[in-house]
Image (tube, rainbow, N blue to C red):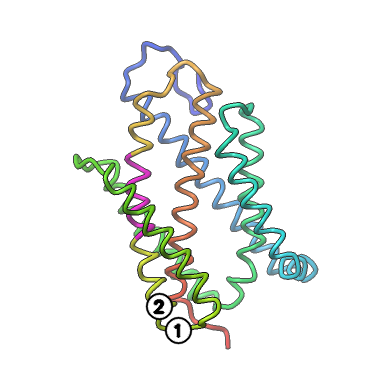
Amino acid sequence: MTQYGMPTSASRPRAEVVNDFLRGVYAWMSGGLLLTAGVAWATVTIQPLFAFAVNAMIFLILAELGLVFFLSMRIRQMSPSTATGAFLGYSALNGLTLAPILMLYTQQSVAATFVVAAGMFGAMSLYGLLTKKDLTSWGSLLFMGLIGIILASVVNIFMQSGTLGFVISGIGVLIFLGLTAYDTQRLKVMGETAPAGDVGALRKMAIMGALQLYLDFINLFLFLLRFMGVSRD
């Protein structure tokens, strides 16, 4: 049996292997989001922890980036337990870095934004799973758009333009909706070639897929929050 309760025989129908792999992806993604939410809640509740998150923000972001690159580049060489620890560590760190941002907005608007983001993410992920259209061509366009909004965001740090920030947020929402569908379809294809009998490899692949969808969701949520978030001021 796998960790998801499915037989490990290589003779299993391929559809079962794909479904097992995708369940693992969404299970790990959901676990990562719950951990992020729990750490964020603890951070805003415990004043010393919140002060640490604010004061160490740059270092925490650098640590997050390091973990993402480490997990992306080295996952094939990692043990399943190391990959799991790196993903959960990233999720926890993200809770620390998100807490000061979430405190800028009312709890009601954060909750409403989360619900909207979850609905939009779910719809686009379902589209990526069910559509017969090949979304491969979206990849290069979405990547270029992502680079564009990163550069525009850096420029806007100095310009402090509300209009440019609004445009960046709108484009960001569209890009991460597209990436959700694109990544979901890519993960479905990955599942079609997943090793049915290798539990460790399946687990690492599921964690990598979970990280991709986790990042899509978090970024979609943050860009939507700029539209829907109500300031505490």
Taking 231 as reference, is 17 above or below it? above
Q: Quadrant of the C terminus?
A: bottom right
Q: Is residue 23 magenta?
A: no
User: Is residue 91 among what the camera can see?
Assistant: yes
Q: Closest to the observer: 175 or 185?
A: 175
Question: Crowding at label 2, few (<14), some or many (≥20) Cα neighbours within 10 Å?
Answer: some
> Marks 1 and 2, how far apart in space?
6 Å
Q: Residue furthest bottom?
A: 233
Q: Main secondary structure of the magenta part?
A: helix
Q: Position of residue 88 (x, y in %)?
A: 63, 44
Q: Position of residue 114 (x, y in %)?
A: 46, 64
- Residue found 52% across the figure and 70% down from its top: 154
- Residue found 60% across the figure and 64% down from its top: 98
Is residue 230 shown left or right of residue 42? left
Taking 51 as reference, is 180 above or below it? above
Quarter of the view holding residue 204: top right
User: Is residue 119 among what the camera can see?
Assistant: no
Q: Closest to the observer: 163 or 80?
A: 163
Q: Position of residue 225 (x, y in %)?
A: 46, 71
Extent of the magenta region: 175-185
Q: Closest to the observer: 159 or 80?
A: 159
Q: Evaluate if marks 1 and 2 touch, with contact meaning CB atoms under 8 Å apart.
A: yes
Q: Position of residue 4 (x, y in %)?
A: 49, 28
Which amino acid type is shown beneath numbered disc 2? Phe
Question: Crowding at label 1, few (<14), some or many (≥20) Cα neighbours within 10 Å?
Answer: few
Is residue 211 shown left or right of residue 181? right
* Residue named by callout 1: 162
Taking 7 as reference, is 180 above or below it? below
Q: Return the mark for residue 166.
A: 2
Which amino acid type is shown beneath numbered disc 1? Gly
